[in-house]
């Protein structure tokens, strides 16, 4: 069945069922979910509201010859929630503005929504509202809402010279799967870790790795007015990654440094003491120190010596 046959309100009704109207107000701080002209949120006293917007466009962010609709929707949820993780926020909910071509298959559209709702719900972010519109391309426009203790949000601009740089986990798998044209892996938004980082006085800056390590480190450095010395050989990689790249004819270093969509956290830590136990435990065994903030431009050092920085994902 095509969406034009189901109709606007038929599609909205199906989405409401997937979201679970009886559960749409079950998230932390959600007073009213789907059903009225707008949702109602009530953050806890002493907290700031965190808001992030993302767009996921067919042919740009997802392709159905590379992945299932359900996986594409799940990945959209991860990307949106990862922005909250990078700020140290607790999720409150998501809204979805869905743009749909009239001839789109209903099962495809509902597969996207199902994946989105399931993944977001697992992380305490119910679908609390949205909109449906006709368009020429299939697009999901998400708004992620969260809360963080007042004045404790993680930022990009507070890093200082000498701070050490850490990556929370392995990089490159998502880029390798895209290069192969077969996406199977679903990254985790590092929400609990982000909240732990926000509680630490030693964490000076943080960003999630969506566009690629080099690109996102560049954003952090620009915001803080510093440079960095990044050791490419210290960046954690998935098990068997080098062999998988050889089989696919892919450049492992390029994928690790510029691939993107791993949604690990890159953060700067003050002082020379060990990483706090709470952060190390939540990050996992592949937490790695990958460099240090320094004066001057970004300097990339690897096992083969110095090399120029490589750009990450850009739309234009």
Image (cartoon, helix red, strand yellow):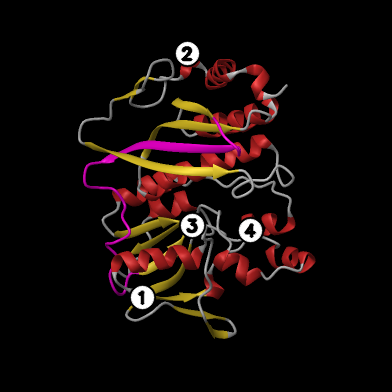
Instruction: Please tell me whether residue 110 is drawn above or below residue 293 in the rendered image.
Output: above
Alpha carbons under labels 2 and 4: distance apart: 38 Å
Q: Is residue 252 magenta?
A: no
Q: Nearer the viewer, residue 39 or 90?
A: 39
- In primary-sequence order, the first of circles 4 and 1 is 4
The x and y percentages for residue 92 are: 38, 31
Find out whether the residues at labels 2 and 1 contact each other: C-beta distance under 8 Å.
no
For disc 4, the neighbor class at 10 Å (few under 14, some 14 to 19, many from 20) is many
Q: Secondary structure at mark 4?
A: helix
In the picture of the structure, the residue carrying the numbered disc 1 is 227
- In primary-sequence order, the first of circles 2 and 1 is 2
In the picture of the structure, the residue carrying the numbered disc 4 is 175
The x and y percentages for residue 193 are: 42, 48
For disc 1, the neighbor class at 10 Å (few under 14, some 14 to 19, many from 20) is many
Instruction: Please tell me whether residue 195 is drawn above or below residue 8 in the rendered image.
Output: below
**Residue segment shown in magenta:** 134-163
Indicate left or right for 275 with 171 as reference. left
Quarter location, residue 72: top right
- In primary-sequence order, the first of circles 3 and 1 is 3
- In primary-sequence order, the first of circles 2 and 4 is 2
The x and y percentages for residue 277 are: 39, 54
Alpha carbons under labels 4 and 1: distance apart: 26 Å
In the picture of the structure, the residue carrying the numbered disc 2 is 22
Residue 270 in view (yes/no):
no
For disc 3, the neighbor class at 10 Å (few under 14, some 14 to 19, many from 20) is many
In the picture of the structure, the residue carrying the numbered disc 3 is 209
Find out whether the residues at labels 2 and 4 contact each other: C-beta distance under 8 Å.
no
Alpha carbons under labels 2 and 1: distance apart: 50 Å
Alpha carbons under labels 4 and 3: distance apart: 12 Å
Q: Residue at x 36, y 45 (%)?
A: 195
């Amino acid at each position: 069945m095509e969406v034009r046959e189901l109709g606007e309100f038929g599609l909205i009704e199906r989405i409401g069922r997937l979201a679970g109207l009886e559960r749409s107000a079950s998230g932390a701080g959600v007073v009213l979910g789907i059903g009225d002209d707008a949702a109602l949120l009530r953050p806890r006293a002493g907290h700031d509201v965190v808001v992030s917007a993302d767009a996921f466009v067919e042919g740009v962010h997802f392709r159905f010859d590379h992945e299932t609709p359900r996986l594409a929707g799940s990945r959209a949820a991860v990307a949106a929630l990862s922005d909250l993780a990078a700020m140290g926020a607790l999720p409150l909910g998501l809204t979805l503005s869905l743009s749909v071509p009239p001839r789109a298959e209903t099962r495809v559209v509902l597969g996207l929504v199902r994946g989105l709702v399931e993944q977001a719900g697992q992380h305490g972010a119910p679908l609390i509202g949205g909109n449906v519109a006709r368009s020429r391309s299939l697009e999901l426009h998400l708004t992620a809402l969260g809360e963080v203790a007042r004045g404790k949000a993680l930022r990009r601009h507070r890093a200082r010279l000498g701070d050490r740089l850490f990556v929370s986990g392995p990089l490159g798998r998502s880029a390798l799967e895209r290069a192969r044209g077969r996406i199977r892996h679903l990254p985790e938004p590092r929400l609990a870790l982000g909240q732990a980082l926000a509680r630490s006085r030693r964490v000076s800056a943080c960003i999630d790795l969506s566009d690629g390590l080099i690109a996102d480190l560049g954003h952090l450095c620009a915001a803080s007015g510093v440079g960095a010395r990044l050791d490419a050989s210290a960046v954690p990689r998935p098990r068997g990654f080098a062999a998988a790249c050889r089989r696919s004819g892919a450049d492992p270093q390029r994928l690790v440094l510029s691939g993107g969509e791993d949604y690990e956290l890159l953060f700067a830590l003050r002082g020379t003491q060990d990483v706090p136990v709470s952060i190390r435990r939540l990050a996992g065994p592949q937490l790695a120190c990958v460099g240090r903030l320094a004066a001057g431009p970004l300097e990339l050092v690897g096992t083969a010596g110095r090399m120029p920085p490589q750009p990450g994902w850009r739309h234009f």
